[in-house]
Image (spheres, rainbow, N blue to C red):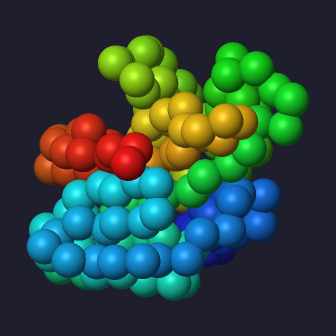
């Protein structure tokens, strides 16, 4: 129970770090299942609810039932400036932040897909396995956007298509 609480706190801390180090953005419009901001938009997973508890732009799968485990899958978006880092240095920075979140992290996949750099990691904590999936996309100037889904590993086959649909719907405008 303590380790589960620690993992949840670390995931929340990662979101908060992304919030404070990321670029602050105000929501402009949520309509017809899309989250639209000045400069970008993306599709909100159907039935997921916006929450401020997990970061500035986050959506929680409120209908997910994981038995005794209170964890629910969520997606969030951050934008962050490279601050002089190359894209590879930024990807390494993101992977290091994920690895700092737990003693037992495994990078399952890392690839380029179109304009996105995809990183998928498995985190083992307190008899639970979590998936952290991230799609990183270069924005305007020195900015990167990160669309991330955090899920129990046991739900990954269900949430993976949601992650793919969400990041693939991300558009710069």
155 lies left or right of 134 = left
- Quadrant of the snapshot with the N terminus: bottom right
Marker count (numbered): 0
Residue 66 position by quadrant:
bottom left
Which residue sits at x=35%, y=18%? Answer: 113
In terms of depth relative to the viewer, which is nearer, 75 or 169?
169
Residue 171 position by quadrant:
top left
Which residue sits at x=42%, y=15%? Answer: 112
Please, is residue 77 above or below residue 108 in the view?
Answer: below
In terms of depth relative to the viewer, which is nearer, 80 or 62?
80
Q: Indicate the position of residue 30 as horizontal and vertical percent values.
A: 28, 77
Farthest right residue in view: 84
Q: Indicate the position of residue 158 as horizontal and vertical percent values.
A: 15, 49
In terms of depth relative to the viewer, which is nearer, 83 or 161?
83
122 lies left or right of 78 = left
- Residue 72 appears in the picture as rendered: no
- Residue 141 appears in the picture as rendered: yes
Please, is residue 88 above or below residue 136 in the view?
Answer: above
Q: Indicate the position of residue 36 as horizontal and vertical percent values.
A: 34, 66
Please, is residue 99 above or below residue 43 in the view?
Answer: above
141 lies left or right of 1 = right
Please, is residue 42 above or below residue 135 in the view?
Answer: below
Which residue sits at x=61%, y=52%? Answer: 79
In terms of depth relative to the viewer, which is nearer, 170 or 173?
173
Q: Indicate the position of residue 153 as horizontal and vertical percent values.
A: 33, 46
């Amino acid at each position: 129970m303590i380790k589960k609480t620690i993992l949840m706190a670390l995931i929340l801390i990662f979101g908060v770090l992304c919030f404070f180090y990321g670029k602050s953005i105000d929501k402009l419009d949520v309509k017809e299942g899309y989250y639209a901001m000045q400069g970008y938009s993306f599709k909100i997973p159907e039935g997921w609810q916006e929450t401020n508890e997990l970061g500035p732009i986050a959506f929680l799968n409120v209908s997910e039932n994981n038995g005794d485990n209170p964890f629910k899958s969520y997606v969030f978006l951050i934008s962050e400036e490279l601050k002089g880092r190359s894209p590879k240095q930024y990807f390494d920075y993101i992977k290091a932040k994920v690895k700092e979140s737990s003693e037992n992290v495994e990078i399952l996949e890392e690839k380029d897909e179109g304009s996105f750099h995809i990183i998928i990691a498995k985190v083992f904590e307190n008899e639970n396995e979590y998936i952290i999936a991230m799609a990183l996309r270069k924005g305007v100037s020195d900015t990167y956007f990160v669309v991330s889904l955090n899920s129990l590993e046991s739900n990954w086959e269900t949430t993976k298509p949601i992650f793919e649909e969400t990041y693939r719907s991300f558009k710069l405008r």
